[in-house]
Image (tube, rainbow, N blue to C red):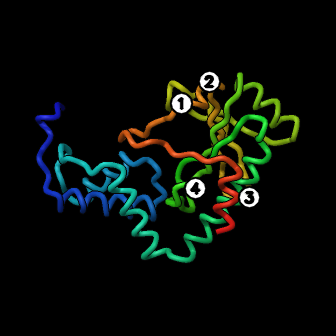
């Protein structure tokens, strides 16, 4: 479908899709924005060629939903996930780790994973590091050609995805699908954030 074939959608319809998608992400644990928007449009009875809101609009609605309906409980969950993330950043310090994703931006829910970017010469190096510490990790599907591997490990709080990239990628600013920068922070910044 070309851009010209996409049906024009009123701002109110876009807002309805964003709101419904945010509810699906919060209640059903959907983590993929596009999937949530498609399912929301279907639930609203809108045609498949409706123009979807961008991820930033859905993210804003998700923040509003969590604040309104999950409030203090959500804040406690995000704090617990961030504490676990800090432990992982400290553990994996040899691989220049960064926290990124929903735990960093505060939209994480009970079904979210902790996303940690690592920079290593090879994924094998990280696997051996974990193996030597008795930590089990399994490979999961890689969805970005810049990423060498993704290892998933369990923690007491949530699963963590270790996103392994070559060292030269550490200086590259990655973008989200909608063009916004993919924010990330180091352990010292997260430590300060947790003290606020």
Location of mark 4 (residue): 103
Q: Are marks 4 and 3 in contact (CB under 8 Å)?
A: no
State the SS at label 2. Answer: helix
Location of mark 2 (residue): 168
Q: Which of 153 and 95 is in front in this view?
A: 95
- Residue at image location 67% in from the left, 35% down from the top: 118
Image position, residue 111 (x, y; %): 56, 57
Label 4 – label 3 distance at C-alpha: 15 Å
**Sequence-wise first label, 2 or 3:** 3
Q: Which of 82 and 186 is in front in this view?
A: 186
In front: mark 4 or mark 1?
A: 1
Q: In which quarter of the image is the C terminus?
A: bottom right
Q: Nearer the viewer, residue 91 or 24?
A: 91
Q: Do the residues labelled 1 and 2 touch (CB within 8 Å)?
A: yes
- Residue at image location 25% in from the left, 53% down from the top: 42
In front: mark 3 or mark 1?
A: 1
Label 4 – label 2 distance at C-alpha: 25 Å
Label 1 – label 2 distance at C-alpha: 8 Å
Label 4 – label 1 distance at C-alpha: 21 Å
**Sequence-wise first label, 3 or 1:** 3
């Amino acid at each position: 479908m070309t851009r010209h074939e996409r049906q024009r959608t009123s701002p109110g319809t876009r807002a309805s899709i964003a709101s419904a998608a945010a509810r699906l992400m919060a209640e059903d644990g959907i983590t993929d924005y596009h999937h949530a928007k498609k399912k929301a449009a279907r639930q609203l009875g809108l045609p498949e060629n409706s123009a979807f809101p961008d991820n930033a609009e859905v993210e804003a609605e998700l923040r509003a939903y969590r604040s309104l309906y999950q409030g203090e409980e959500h804040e406690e969950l995000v704090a617990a996930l961030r504490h676990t993330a800090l432990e992982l950043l400290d553990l994996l310090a040899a691989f220049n780790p960064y926290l990124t994703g929903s735990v960093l931006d505060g939209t994480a829910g009970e079904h979210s994973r902790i996303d940690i970017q690592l920079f290593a010469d090879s994924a094998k190096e990280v696997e051996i590091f974990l193996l030597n510490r008795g930590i089990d990790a399994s490979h999961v599907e890689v969805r970005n050609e810049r990423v060498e591997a993704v290892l998933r490990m369990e923690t007491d709080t949530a699963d963590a995805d270790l996103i392994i990239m070559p060292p030269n990628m550490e200086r590259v600013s990655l973008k989200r699908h909608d063009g916004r920068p993919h924010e990330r922070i180091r352990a010292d910044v997260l430590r300060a954030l947790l003290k606020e």
